[in-house]
Amino acid sequence: MNEGYMLWEKSKKLIPGGNMLISKRPNLFAPRYWPTYYKKAKGCFVWDLENKKYTDMSIMGIGTNILGYGNEYVDDQVLKAIKFGNMSTLNCPEEVELAEQLIKIHPWANMVKFARSGGEANSIAVRIARAFSGKDKVIFCGYHGWHDWYISASNKKGALTEHLFQDLTSKGVPTSLNGTSIPFKWNDLSDLKRIIIKNKEEIGAIKMEVTRNIKPSKEFLKGVRELCDYYKIVLIFDECTSGFRETFGGLHLKYGIDPDISIFGKALGNGYAISAVIGKEKVMNAAKDSFISSTFWTERIGNLAGLATLKEMKRINSWNLITNLGEEIQNKWKLTAKESGIDISVGVLPAISSFKFNSKNSLEYKTFLTREFLKRNYLASNLLFVSTEHLKIDLSEYFEILKNVFEKIAMRESGEIKEKLVPDNELCGETFRRLN
Ligand SMILES: Cc1ncc(COP(=O)(O)O)c(C=O)c1O
């Protein structure tokens, strides 16, 4: 029994759910075996409580560290905030500089609000869109955080199945919000149009991720933009996860479709908390007619980390590096699966590479894979957020292990191995819908 497991058992008695982020719960990887807690993280390596060193071929802080853990340039800038004061009675000037930088990258935008998490930034964007449009309803597609405006959709049973989790419970979210947030189907313009027409006098915003487990067609994004223009709806792209993965900025830059508001989080501070809502002046100014304000949105670390991360990403063209490596990894996944004779589907965004086992035993295989990799000191699952640090390591051992794992899975799938690779009571749980 590892130390991490024992601490997790203790934690569950002290912290409801055990921790603060569902995606970092050990039951999503390999119950009982996943190390769960870390002592140190550097580059693409993580040390657990027993000082065992792992290569992180999994979620890399769930997408926060494109430049790897503990990037020296970013950390040096952050240390300045600590040396000269992270907080004071006055504002830090770096927030103005960071706002300027984000606008420079996205010429369609003229104003910015900062927060610290993606969910907060999403709530700010919805508040501004509602204030601007004077309309309450939001149509959305994707995952947008934990706040009431979004989770209220799941008051209608199953409404978030395709966007978040199956069987999501939403107790504590006022039922008076029912019907204010309505999901639409990804890449399906006619579904969106139908919802708009049904609710047209009341829709203030369309909020969506720019890509999900399938790529958007250019016509789809263009069509969404046209519908928003026609019905005077604020278009919000949530780029918390997709931002900076394939372009220097929002993924929408690649498609040439401008929203009215875009949201960034996750990778913006390379592991330090900073999120941003950028938008067109006429829309963003509506923030002044509402109340949007929070003490720690003014701390300096996030801004300095954001500025340093942007500078370093630009210097090394990180989005190209992680996309190219992600493509290579995806191709090798496909080849290894083919050679082993198993059926997998691979996700679309190379910098956030994922695959799924096309089998009724997918959770058994996923858990087995993680357990086998742990034996060889890798944190691995079917999802990999690629970082520039992964370019510095030799991946041949990773693929050798993967080949052995896939071959064993093929034998189990064909019935050659009769016994389950993982007992039922040790299977991992389902992750977010869009990831596999
Ligand atoms: C697209 C998107 N929006 C919002 C969020 C929520 O961000 P946070 O967990 O920082 O609140 C996430 C997190 O996974 C996300 O992927």
Image: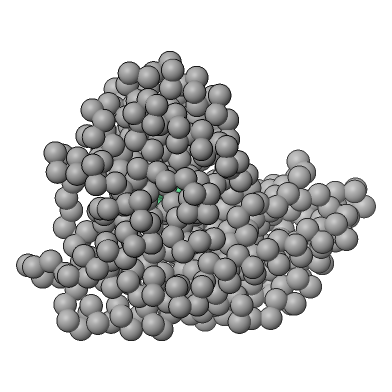
Q: Residue at x 75, y 62 (%)?
A: 331
Residue 266 or residue 407, whichever sits in front: 266
Q: Is residue 8 visible?
A: no
Residue 431 picture location, percent across and down:
57, 48
Determine the residue located farthest toward the left in the rendered image: 89
Residue 65 picture location, percent across and down:
47, 68
Residue 4 picture location, percent across and down:
50, 68
Residue 164 picture location, percent across and down:
51, 40
Q: Residue 161 occupies which quadrant of the picture? A: top right
Residue 18 or residue 160, whichever sits in front: 160
Q: How many marks?
A: 0
Q: Residue at x 49, y 69 (%)?
A: 66
Q: Residue at x 45, y 73 (%)?
A: 314
Q: Seen in the image, is 188 located left or right of residue 143?
A: right
Q: How is the image coloured?
A: one colour
Q: Indicate the quadrant containing the N terminus: top left, top right, bottom left or bottom right.
A: bottom right
